[in-house]
Structures are given as structure tokens and as C-alpha cells.
Image: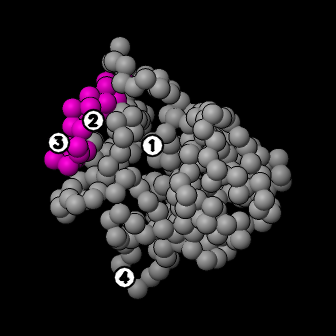
Amino acid sequence: MVTYLPDEGFPARLEKVTSQFSQTIVVDNSPSDGAPKELSITTTLPRIHVVSNATNIGVAAALNQGIEKASQLGFRWVITLDQDTEVEPRMPETLLEEYRLLPAGKALLGANYWDVHKGQMAVPCYGSTRDPKERKTVITSGCLIPISLFRDIGSFREDYFIDSVDHEFCLRARAHGYRVFITCRPLMRQTVGAAHGRVGRICRLLGRRHSAPRKYFMARNSLATVKTYLFREPTWGLCQVARLVAEVAFILSCERERSKQLRAFAVGVLHGVKGRLGPIEETWPSGAS
């Protein structure tokens, strides 16, 4: 579980996790001068390991630290989680049970979830079968991954920092012969983006509220991933381009700081096309050079 200045509800969510897993690894990216009291509970909970970075090194790098720690502890499987994920009862057991339903071969399995802001399932399942559904990609949180997969295809892309880290990893896994699935049953509740507030249904469909830096990373990393995998995954790539167009419409129609958001998004598009990756300065936005 990767954390960054977690909110006051984090300790309760973390307790639900630690009650289900034999070991929990928390990698904290919170700055050392603003260490959140919400994280202090981790020092008293059993079966927990805390890796403190004292600065935000990005989601991908923190995930890689957690994977390395799990490998050192002798585990063969990991489930990656976000700090705002609320797990349902028996999540790890259910994921392993569902994994056994998958076709023989190399695979990773994501957990379906209830989208709190949209008030609906992330991936609806229709028909009589409730077996896992094959997908191009799944989100990082709730993903059951054999550690051997990292030896096969490499770690999460640290130059992505945040956003599309999961998409790129799944597409890379597919390129190496792995298949990606998601459960039909929702195994967690997930908050994606900030609350929409009093907005219409169109805004809820178009996108989610994020800060200007997140808009930058969303545009940049989406385009960088499309560039890498377009010929191997053309349908996915075209859908991502359509989502970016919808994001522009969302900013124009639904966001409060339109000029700041558009500028961040435009710089992200430029950097994505140029292949300029990595973290950004804290004094964002600093320009498109």
C-alpha cells in the first residue's frame, strides 16, 4: 500500500487490510516535515512493515519498493492497494479463488470495485457467468500479481511517477504473453478523483476532478503509453485518445480553474509527444520547455 498524506479515514481502512493479510507493507511518500498523524497507527498494528521515504518519490517507485520488500520476506504473491481503497471481507481469499478459475497460463487478476463518486460498479458484468472477465488493463489497487511476473517483464515504470503506471504495466505484461482479468464481484470500494459536487450527469460521465499537476500527468503518461503500444493495442490506444478529448471537454465544462487546468493538460500533451517523463517541480506550473 502506497501512502501520501493520508486522510483521517486511513487508519480504519488500514485496519481492515491488516485484519485480512498475513503481512502488510506500507510505503509512505509523505514529506518528512509534514508526516501525517494518520500514519502513526502503523507502528502499533501487528504484521506490518513501514518503508518511509520522507519525500514523494512517486507511486511507481514506491510500488517497486514494496514488491522488493515482499520478495525479501519470501512471498510469491502480492496485492497492490491505494491508500483510499476500502477492502471488502475475504478479499485476498476471494482473489486467489478467482485466480484458480482463470485459463491455465500466465495471468494477473484485478479486483472489481464500487466507484464511490460515480455510484456504480467500475466494470459491470452481464449474463449468467460470474467468472473473471478478460481486460486490456486494470487499475493498480486490488491487483493480484505473482512476484515472478516482475522478474519476467520488469518493474513499474518509475519515470511515469503517477498515472498510467497500471495501464503501462498491464500492456507490457500482455506483450510478454500474460493475460489480464478482472473479477465480476466487487471486492473493494474505491474513490477515484475528487468529488464532483453539484454537477450534472454529463460531467460525471466525462471525467473526474483532479489537480492541475494530475491533469499534466494524465495527459503526458497516456500519450506516452499510446505511443509505445499503439500498433500492438490499437483499440486501446484509440480509446485513450478519445478519453483525452473527453477530458478537455470536462475541463472546459466542469472544472473551476479552467485556464490552469488547460495549461497543465497542454504541457502534458507536449511532453507526452516529446517523451519527456519523470517528476515535475514542486513550483508547478513552470513552463513547457
Identify residue for label 4. 127
Mark 2 vs mark 1, foreground winner is: 2
Q: Eyeballing the image, is 139 above or below 272?
A: below
Mark 3 burial class by Cα count in 10 Å: few <14, some 14-19, many 20+: some
Q: Most extreme residue toward the bottom, as rendered? A: 128
Q: Eyeballing the image, is 279 above or below 45?
A: above
Identify residue for label 3. 252
Label 4, secondary structure: give it. Answer: loop
- For the residues labelled 2 and 1, say whether their Cβ atoms are less than 8 Å apart: no
Name which residue type carries label 2. Gln
Who is closer to the viewer here, 50 or 163?
50
Mark 2 burial class by Cα count in 10 Å: few <14, some 14-19, many 20+: many
Q: Which mark is residue 261?
A: 2
Name which residue type carries label 1. Ser
Percent from the top left, x then y, of residue 40?
Answer: 70, 52
The answer to whether residue 264 is left or right of residue 97 is left
Percent from the top left, x then y, of residue 72?
Answer: 82, 47
Label 3, secondary structure: give it. Answer: helix
The answer to whether residue 206 is left or right of residue 64 is left
Q: Is residue 137 magenta?
A: no
> How many angstroms separate mark 4 from mark 1 (CA)?
30 Å
